[in-house]
Image: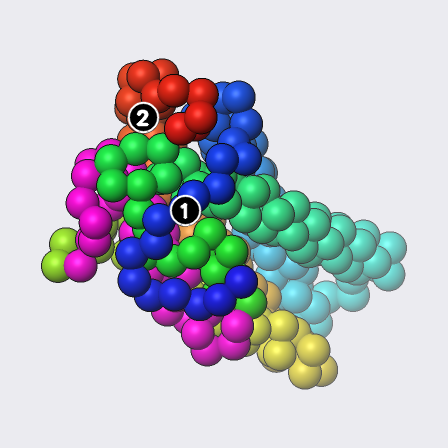
Amino acid sequence: MRPYDGAVTSTSSSQPADPIGSERVRARWTRGLLITCLVVDLAGIASGLAQRALLLRMAAGEQVPTTVAQANDTRHAAIGKLQIIAFLITVILWFAWQSRAYRNLRLVGSGKTRFTQGWAIGYWFIPFVNLVRPYQIIADLWLRSENQNADDTTTGRSAPTAVSLWWGGYLVAGIMGRVVMTMSLNATTIEQLQTATVAGMLGDALGVLSAFLAIRVVKGIDQYQQRFIPAVAGSSPGQV
């Protein structure tokens, strides 16, 4: 596997019997998990509101029963674990969907892509590079899916607004998540816990926005790729 930043034409013929159907199934599962992430983040916001109310009571000098405080901590920690689990599963499904969708580009039009299929996933794991490349990959995937990969290159075409908004939301949510984690670990007073709780709710709100925009991206690309069906159906078995 080697990095490549020009047009790539794949010659491999190892495709499933229904590559477009495979992409659609993966897209649906990915959207389903993104919705799960969105719902869990909303639960996180609700839990944060309850925790903040409890902290305000404590700051006012009220004696909060230990059982109430423990129940709050248990609930908040459980939601945090669910957020991590949902995110990790979604990442796996995202890569499965992206890999299939990017590979499908070989079936129509020029049959070319800006990046190799392997590096379309690999770039996500390279520090600093993964701040830009994944955005470029998804933009390339969207633009080529939109016009059935009619052109050899997408250079000169503007990145889709939906992709730009999603990537911006994704980066901001990621940065906020790290900030919240640091604040939570270092909070030792009620005031600091209140600040960390509010920051956590803001982070969850950004997570909701990021998930919503990601759903829009997956749905948009999937809809474009469903238009590949006539072209793929007209290909010979050897071509598919």
Q: Is residue 143 left or right of residue 48?
A: left
Q: Quick check: is 142 in the magenta stretch?
A: yes
Which residue occupies the foreground of this view, 75 or 108? 108
Residue 223, compared with residue 204, is above or below; it is above
Q: Secondary structure at mark 2?
A: loop
Q: Is residue 193 left or right of residue 134?
A: right
| First of labels 1, 2 by sequence position | 1
Q: Which residues are magenta?
A: 126-155
10 Å neighbourhood of mark 2: few (<14), some, or many (≥20)?
many
- Quadrant of residue 104 within the rendered picture: top left
The label on residue 168 is: none
Q: Quick check: is 7 in the magenta stretch?
A: no
Which residue occupies the foreground of this view, 142 or 77? 142
Whole-percent x and y of residue 120? 45, 56
> The residue under label 1 is which amino acid type?
Ser
Whether the residues at callouts 1 and 2 have beta carbons within 8 Å, the answer is: no
Whole-percent x and y of residue 140? 30, 52
Q: Secondary structure at mark 1?
A: loop
Whole-percent x and y of residue 222? 38, 32
> The residue under label 2 is which amino acid type?
Phe
**Going 48% across and 60% down the picture, which residue do you hit?**
119
The label on residue 228 is: 2
Residue 42, compared with residue 25, is above or below; it is below
**Going 73% across and 54% down the picture, which residue do you hit?**
81
**Going 12% across and 59% down the picture, which residue do you hit?**
156
The label on residue 10 is: 1
Whether residue 42 is visible: no
**Going 83% across and 58% down the picture, which residue do you hit?**
70
- Quadrant of residue 189 within the rendered picture: bottom right
